[in-house]
Amino acid sequence: MTETSSRSARSERRRSRRAAAGGAPEQRPFAQPRLLHAPTEIISADQVEAIHLASLRILRDIGMSVLDPETRALYARAGATVDGEMVRFDPEMVDELIVTAPAEFTLHSWNPARSLHVGGDWLSFGSVGSAPNSADLDGGRRTGNRHDFQNLLRLAHMLTSIHFLGGYPAEPVDIHPSVRHLHATFDMLTLTDRVFDVYSLGRQRNIDVIEMARIARGVSHEQLDREPSLFTIVNTNSPLTLDTPMSHGIIEMARANQVTCVTPFTLAGAMAPITLAGALAQQNAEGLAGLVLTQIVRPGSPFIYGGFTSNVDMQSGAPAFGTPEYWKTAIIGGQLARRYQVPYRSSNTCAANAVDAQAAYESMFSIWGAVSGASNFTMHGAGWMEGGLQASFEKMVLDADLLHMASAALDPLVIDDDTLAFDTIAEVGPGGHFFGTPHTQERFRTEFYRPMISDWRNYETWAEAGRPEAAQRASHLVTAFLAEYEPPPMDDAIRAELTDFVERRSAEGGVPTDF
């Protein structure tokens, strides 16, 4: 037995012992998957160009409503036409400005082993973000709170298919909004070692959290300025509106050379035309307006093109997710991002209210669209429920399993004399079986992906065990992962500096709020 297969066998024995004892299963190592084959393209290059030209026409003839005077002034100095709150863009100006955004960059964690490659054929998956409610099988659905927020962070830290934090998993509403960003960021930095984001809800929040990222990494302001270390998601107010807090967030992040992802929330039939082509043209126009702003503020600052076009249920008006339409727009969004040579963001979404078959198939459809479309940065990868209104503990584990499956499906297939197994086929011959061959015995523990949740027992054994279904198995795994959680080791001096910063800014009142 080789050293590698020996290590694999020992690892599998540890996994089996832990699983038998009710502990957390062993997972694939933390690693970014890569899309080593060509991404799916479902429209032609001419059709991509037609969407691009339609977007430029929207920006030139209709324009964007920009509510912030400072932002309008920046656009005007770059050559846009400003008429009150309306900003209109010359197509040549747009084409000239967007080319300075980088095609790839590194997003740095305070733990270098968790830094991410963003762009190219690199993929990454994030945890659910911004849900106002949390839920589990034991406690049901409830308003977001810091206790659940922290446990969702701990669970995300334990799940190796989650590469970054997609925001506050569930909003900790029991922390006052004036200081919430300080305490929530402290939790994200100390309970996990994943790359994280800042909510662009006003300039000072961005400034505070950028400083906390610098402290956590233990680097100078100059080094942080060279090395992007956090990101923000900016949702335009579709249709065609950019509000003041989001504008300020874009400006501050670009000035500091941190990552901005502009993601229009374009629901076909509601906030965008009912046709997917029209909704994508509007999405693209709003995204380009954001990209232009980042490059006006600081040419070369990192930008991610965000796609989030889905449809609504035209009978009720409710958002629909994980649909064939969402799959199509996820893939076309990737084609548009590659047209502009910038990284691409998509999402894992579902509209299900329970961790059931609907939750699984809508999420799998979303993940399929994201991976096929070469999403470099897949938000809400694990835990999103109820159209984003709920962060589910069980769904986070189920999604993490799906993400591992997607990553395993992308593993390169090795084809050589050893894997072609001619000698083993000859040894077994006609009518035999391969269970006992050395070739099988050396590989049976590691050759195939073993899902965390799937139950492959026969019917009788499963029935005798109480007929557990996927949600119950996921609930058991939530308990097991949280029981084994240990915080990532952080330097005591850095943790103390973070604590001092949070206490000082909290004592100063944090940021102004309306309530």
Image (tube, rainbow, N blue to C red):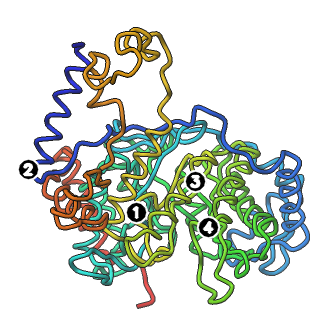
- Which residue was labeled with disc 1? 208
In this rendering, does residue 189 appear at all? yes
Disc assigned to residue 354: none
Disc assigned to residue 21: 2
Res. 395 image quadrant: bottom left
Which of the two labelled residues, at mark 3 and mark 1, occupies the earlier sequence position? 1
Distance CA(mark 1)–CA(mark 4): 38 Å
- Residue 433 placement, left or right of 106: left
Three-letter amino acid code of the residue under disc 4: Thr
Three-letter amino acid code of the residue under disc 1: Asp
Which of the two labelled residues, at mark 2 and mark 4, occupies the earlier sequence position? 2
Mark 1: few, some, or many residues within 10 Å (few <14, many ≥20)? some
Distance CA(mark 2)–CA(mark 1): 44 Å
Which of the two labelled residues, at mark 2 and mark 1, occupies the earlier sequence position? 2
Element marked by disc 2? loop
Q: Residue at x 49, y 55 (%)?
A: 231
Above or below — where is 126 with respect to 415? below
Res. 355 image quadrant: bottom left
CB-based contact (under 8 Å), mark 3 and mark 1: no
- Which residue was labeled with disc 4? 323
